[in-house]
Image: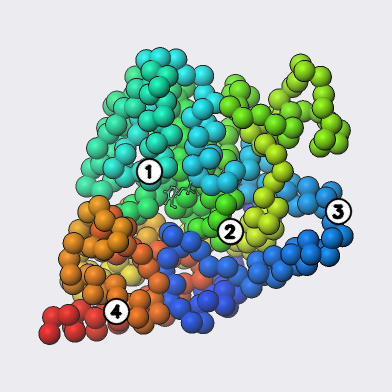
Amino acid sequence: MGLATVPTPTDRCIADAHRDYPATAELTYMDVAARGLMSQQVRAALDAHLDTLASGEINKDDFFALVERTRARFAAMIRAQSDEIAFTKNVSEGLNMVATGLPWEAGDNVIVCPELEHPNNVYCWLNLRQHGVEVRTVAPCQGHLPVADMIERMDARTRTVTASTVTFAPGFRTDIERLGQACRERGIFFLVDAAQSCGVLQTDVEASHIDGLAVSTQKGLLGLYGMGFLYCRREWAERIQPAYLARFGVDLGDAHEASMGSEAYKLMPAARRFDVGNYNFVGCVAADASMGQLLTYDPKAVEHYVVGLAHELAQGFMDLGLPVCGGAPGAHLAGIVTVGELGSSHYGTDDARFNQLYTSLHDHAVRLSIRRGVLRFSLHLYNTEDDVNRVLELAQQGLGSSRR
Ligand SMILES: Cc1ncc(COP(=O)(O)O)c(C=O)c1O
């Protein structure tokens, strides 16, 4: 499925997408950074799949066809080739597949910004210290990943640079193209954690010089927990010996899945070598249906729409005098708007006013999160301008009552 063939709807069409998501009738849902909403189409596809499972009349070839369609759809979403995609459980599994597969030597280094990455993009690197790998850490720059510093810290022993495309808090975008270009020029593996961007922001692994990309499906891809993808660029994948190996990672042509070849096995091309045993078919059903829906929109138009709403929300909070992370809306904004002072708690903020605001919004059926001590509002194509206006009105009322 080529992206060039999908229609380009207007923003108005995207705004109508909320009708496909039943929860939007009850909630003002601004929490895709935790997990996205399930559409009625995904629900129907899952129901049909469960009916098939319950009936006992299962044709596994249909399941394998589903797996390949899901793989192709994800490839289309990030502008990769299908065989550059492997199936994973989540982001951490994808990151670990790369971390454990690359040919490290003692004294090599990986560059990472632990303060801004999710812990799952930190522990996989700390785990390499046992092999003498240096984890070269950089500090954030006013909540941003310090791209210039990361480039400066690269040297002849740097094998991998890793970065979130968008951080989970404060939710700023990383200048992925610049970092990717610097890695490509030096032959360094550029690995991104795209948990907070895939499905919301347009992704083009070629244009961004990305060598590896890990994502889960329950956030912007609007699928289920327990299912994710790893993109690994062909040139790199074919130099990697996976740490785990099972039947689907071995090339036996059309032979049955239970066939054993000779002991001198050949790995599957590109990222298919990372596939292990049976797939998460239920997760595939959801991801296949949700990506099928997402792909009916031009990804550029989805990004434009969602980021536009985020700008309105950020500006509205600023007009209310709230401390929006990153200040005035600008190029750093993706689909996440955060409010407050960055801290470390994910259970509350350090400011009683914001804890009260969180509770008051929650009581009015707004869904958001607190991460790193800030209120996090995260948007997707099912959000509308009405949602933004409602949250701003509620915030104004909530702040008014907390001042009394
Ligand atoms: C940037 C980022 N990476 C990773 C994760 C989670 O990793 P995993 O999918 O392995 O649970 C999250 C949030 O859940 C995240 O926001």
- As measured in the structure, the alpha-carbon distance from the residue carrying label 2 to the one carrying label 1 is 21 Å
Examine the image and state in which quarter residue 313 appears: bottom left
Ligand 1 contact, mark 4 (Cβ < 8 Å): no
Disc 2 to disc 1: CB gap under 8 Å: no
Q: Residue at x 74, y 32 (%)?
A: 247
Farthest left residue?
Answer: 404
Residue 77 position in % (x across, y down): 60, 50
Residue that label 3 marks: 59
Mark 1 vs mark 3, CA separation in Å: 40 Å
Q: Can I make out residue 187 in this image?
A: yes
Corner quadrant of residue 273: top right
Find residue 224 and name its label: 2
Image height check: is 322 above or below 207? below
In this rendering, the answer to whether 249 lies above or below 332 is above
Q: Position of residue 14 (x, y in %)?
A: 54, 70
Q: CA distance from mark 3 to mark 2?
A: 23 Å
List the residue tagged with mark 4. Answer: 360
Position of residue 254 in the picture relative to residue 206 (left or right): right
Asked which secondary structure carries label 2, the reply is: loop
Identity of the amino acid at label 2? Leu
Q: Residues within 10 Å of mark 4 (few under 14, many from 20)?
A: some
In the displayed structure image, the side of residue 366 where residue 299 appears, left or right: right
Which residue is under mark 1? 119
Question: Residue at position x 28%, y 46% from top?
Answer: 144
